[in-house]
Image (spheres, rainbow, N blue to C red):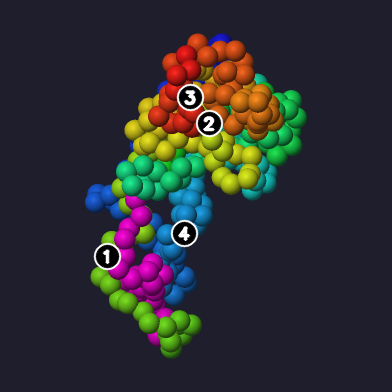
Amino acid sequence: MTKRQHIKKFEKALYGFVDELQQYVSTETGEWTIKGFIDIYKNIYTISSDTKIISKILEIHIFPEILRFAEKNNYKIILAEHQNWYPDLTFISNENEKIKFAVDIKTTYRKNGKVAGFTLGSHGAYFKERDKSKNIQFPYNEYTGHYCLGIIYTRTDFEDDLVETELYQVNELEAELGKDNDPVKDRKVTTIQNLKSIASVIKDFEFFVAPKWKIASDSQGSGNTANIGSIKDIEDLKKGNGVFSKLGEKWFDEYWMNYGTATMIKDGKTIKITNIWDFLEFKGRKDLFGKVVAKHAKKRKNKNDK
């Protein structure tokens, strides 16, 4: 099987897999099936809608399905050895161990008709020095492809923020021990009929998968850290219609390898290149301006450039 055939096989399987995940994590009304944490006394502690907490629990929630996906499609999985390493998951073909796919799980919430956005990994050390293994499970150039498995959700609006962290005791899970043996007996406990009665902190999931270069913007994803930012339009995320989607992966790689380090003279001043327009001009390729998905790129300062 050729490299291209391995890519097609993996992408086909991964696209089919994300279509199944929505039913796995959602109730028939679209709410998250995770309601909270349970202790040995059968008290349910609801969770906060803090994005870091949501992200980690979602990853734990879908991980058994990811394991089944890998086994079904003849891959083994290696998890990132350290929390800040790239990628979250490495899929290695059992047919050919040289075939490796990087998959990052990214969660984000809807915000004013778009999403809050997320990062697509570093454009620093391992991205530039692709034969090195600093902060990456395997050297970047050993991966056959790099993908994002995205989860988009809506936060549930509560009139009272404290509702997010209430304590419940569900009738269908009533504790066998009496209240006197329950260490939370002095806390306010709300009794409900069944688990579905507990409001979920998030709902209305959408899943997508895309090669990360296809959903990248030409802006950093977070503050001063060297992270590649995603586009924020939901439909374009699902379609893989990012800034570089028509330019191609090679331009994505070259732009982000040189982001903020390459310089050019503009209006008599030396500037760092931090947008796709300046980069293409720097490379003498203004003829490619028409291939930039402009609605997701930084604004051009001189729209008369051709």
Q: Pointer 2 and pointer 3: residues touching (CB < 8 Å)?
A: no
Magenta segment includes 78: no
Position of residue 295 relative to residue 34, above or below, is above
Residue type beneath disc 1 = Ser
Residue under numbered circle 3? 302
Specify which label sits upstream in the sequence, 3 or 1.
1
Residue under numbered circle 1? 197
Residue 290 quadrant:
top left
* Residue at x-position 42% and y-position 83%: 187
Tell me residue 245's x, y (percent).
46, 22
Residue under numbered circle 4? 50
Q: Dot 4 lies on which element?
A: loop
**What number is the disc on residue 218?**
2
Residue type beneath disc 4 = Asp
Magenta range is 152-179
The residues bearing labels 4 and 3 have C-alpha atoms spaced at a distance of: 41 Å
Q: How dense is the environment of label 1, judged by Cα within 10 Å: few (below 14), some, or many (20 and up)? A: few
Specify which label sits upstream in the sequence, 4 or 2.
4
Camera-side residue of 198 and 291: 291
